[in-house]
Image (cartoon, rainbow, N blue to C red):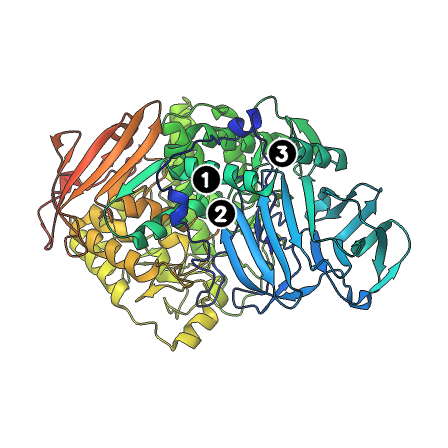
Amino acid sequence: MRFIPSIRKFGLSLMLCGIATGVSAQKQPVDYVNPYIGSISHLLVPTFPTVHLPNSLLRVYPNRSDYTGDLLKGFPVLVATHREGSIFGLSPFQGDEKKLKPIISFSYDQEKLTPYSYSVYLDEQQTEVRFGLSHQSALYEFDFKPENPSYLVVTSGNGALKWDGKAVAGFQQIANNTRVFIYLKPDQAPESSSVLQDNKLTGGAEASGKNASVVLKFGKGTKTVRVRYGISFIDEAQAQKNLEREVAGADLKTLQEKGRQIWNESLGKIAVSGNSDNEKSIFYTSLYRTFERPVCISEDGRYYSAFDRKVHSDNGTPFFTDDWIWDSYRAHHPLRILLDPEKEENILNSFVRMTEQMERPWWPTFPDVAGDGRKMNSNHGVASVIDAHRKGLKGFDLEKAYLACKGAITEKTLSPWSGKPAGKLDQFYKEHGYIPALKEGEKETNPEVHGFEKRQPVAVTLGTAYDEWCLSQLAKDLGKTDDYRHFLKQSYNYRNLFHPETGFFHPKDSDGKFIQPFDYVFSGGIGARDYYDENNAWTYRWDVQHNVKDLISLTGGSEKFVSALDEMFAAPLGKSKYGFYAQLPDQTGNVGQFTMANEPSLHIPYLYNYAGQPWKTQKRIRALLNQWFRNDLMGIPGDEDGGGLTSFVVFSYMGFYPVTPGMPVYNIGSPMFDKVKMDLGNGKFFEVEAVNNSAENKYIQSATLNGKTWSKPWFPHTELISGGKLVLQMGPKANRNWGASVNDAPPSAEKME
């Protein structure tokens, strides 16, 4: 089982990190959570069944090759991120000492997992394993057969461990010279201790290097061994403090009950009614997934930052990291603005601190516990800044955020997966308004371009145009008129790659000529990265979130725009599934050429709202939710990315979605529940009621917003955040007049000045 540590504290720190506790006598939302949803998918592994507290660093899940893996590979105490894999390992064992290994594989049965607890039976070993956790520490219980000696093997994959007679302490090295420290203490003293080297037991109390292992031996008659441990990114002493603060003296039941309370408080911020328990399971499991990232790593008012490799005081404001912004800016950050605005402020404040700690003060793109990965394309963190600002959040320095975002877009290279300074490609973009594509047979000569990820010229041009729109809006609100006008003009750069004859965004070479011949499905190599990214041209045809109105105009008007959307959902793969996914493994969850499995597609079903046919959005949203998000092992169509995909499910189940972060409005879809009630804090609630709602009655007939007739397929954030109610009258056939007026379309970017 892989266990991911939670860096939070009870009491004051728990509240600072945005977690409150509460109990209800009624059935709780956490009871609907099925952590196994999505453990298997077509190609990628979308999710892991994870035990953790909301936004806490101590996260854990079964350590096996995949869900169908026949063996558990020990019991890791932590996974720093899913990409890091297991951090430390813990293997209980009874049997011949010669069979001891750093990580022991076990046959298992009777696995039971909730967001706050885990248990399993190691059938061949005849050992019961139980687990409960807090934010930075946890407790294992192992029930052995008392007639045989028992062992615990504690392993650091790359580091050092030492037994001091009371506890095992040490570290494991992960990326960017970052260390994770552990302090692990059994409740009862072992009979003896030893070191495992080259699969042989030797004397001594210290081990270092690869798979450094300390073995604790418990004598015959020992039935239950309890092991408590703390995790820290600061040092061993802090790991011990975390253990003592959170789990010292606590029994397993108490830990699990406290974890249950915390989850119910977080999930209970949205109450739903109507529809079956099956839909509630999908909804609350999706909501549970949105609390996986980012994580709070403040420990007793301090935190280790991999961005400058120093320990800092958090000055009473917790520090968060591990956020894959390319995925999360679209719906994950907007959801948190509604459910926990203070936490969102703390997260953005953390990003500001990161820019102050890095060598170059550029807004992060993929910050994790080992620093910023600079992964994917574009610099979409700017969207979360303007979105929070426009929705009234103030707990971060907007001026510093703007300058850091501006630097990330204008001073750092736009080349994907790179943190290098701007180069020749960036200068070309500034002069010509697009990233040039390589011609057939032309070799890459720019050193900032990643060898595998390529230039991704269309994806980068479109994504940067949106980022520059976000910058323009920040500049406008900060009174930077020249910047506002400049970046607003730049936000129209997507036009430079629009092919008027085909209606697609088409790569151009450095001479300004469209690359020919060209296939909008298969050109671009693996993941279409020569031109796009992870998805083909059909997905990026709609990647103008900030100016859908202008995109409709480019396409030839609303009728042609709707026709093009319809065509996408009906277009064949063009090859066998084997051939298609061999080239485009991220583009699963297909309905025609539409992919439900990748974040750049999430806003597409809502685009009918902009073209006078919102009934098609209503139809499509219901279909996609039913087709691809289910209460089973294959219930998520692609890589979930810690809340990036499931935030779409949460919003769409409620009946609305933020198509354009930075514009404080929401597009209306078709709610799955009869009633939704969102707790906004301070005694305010926003409700959505779908009257006569059912699987058949998915079409909006009429609506009221806060008691007034509402004819628009969208509504402003101000109507939500002040508390209110959206009432939708539902029916089995579309009312094609509702929301169809040109004047009722959702807003788009302003025209260039």
Q: Amino acid at mark 2?
A: Pro
Badge 2, how many Cα within 10 Å: few under 14, some, many 20+?
Answer: many
- Is there any visible trace of residue 422 in the rendered image? no
Please state if 326 lies on the left or on the right of 635 as rendered: right
Secondary structure at numbered mark 2: loop
Secondary structure at numbered mark 1: helix
Q: Quadrant of residue 570?
A: bottom left
Q: Quadrant of residue 490?
A: top left
User: Horizontal and vertical percent for residue 248?
Assistant: 67, 35
Please state if 105 lies on the left or on the right of 660 as rendered: right
First of labels 2, 1 by sequence position? 2
Is 242 or 514 nearer to us in this picture?
Answer: 242
Is 455 or 2 nearer to us in this picture?
Answer: 2
First of labels 3, 2 by sequence position? 2
User: Horizontal and vertical percent for residue 612?
Assistant: 15, 48
Identify which residue is drawn at 47% across, 61% down.
Answer: 39
Is 5 or 509 nearer to us in this picture?
Answer: 5
Q: In whole angstroms, how far apart are the C-alphas of marks 2 and 1? A: 8 Å
Residue for badge 3: 246
First of labels 3, 1 by sequence position? 3
Q: In whole angstroms, how far apart are the C-alphas of marks 3 and 2? A: 18 Å
Q: Are marks 2 and 1 in contact (CB under 8 Å)?
A: yes
Say above or below: 136 vs 315: below
Residue for badge 1: 263
Is 510 or 318 nearer to us in this picture?
Answer: 318
Q: Amino acid at mark 3?
A: Glu
Q: In whole angstroms, how far apart are the C-alphas of marks 3 and 1? A: 17 Å
Q: Amino acid at mark 1?
A: Trp
Q: Tell me the tag on residue 115.
A: 2
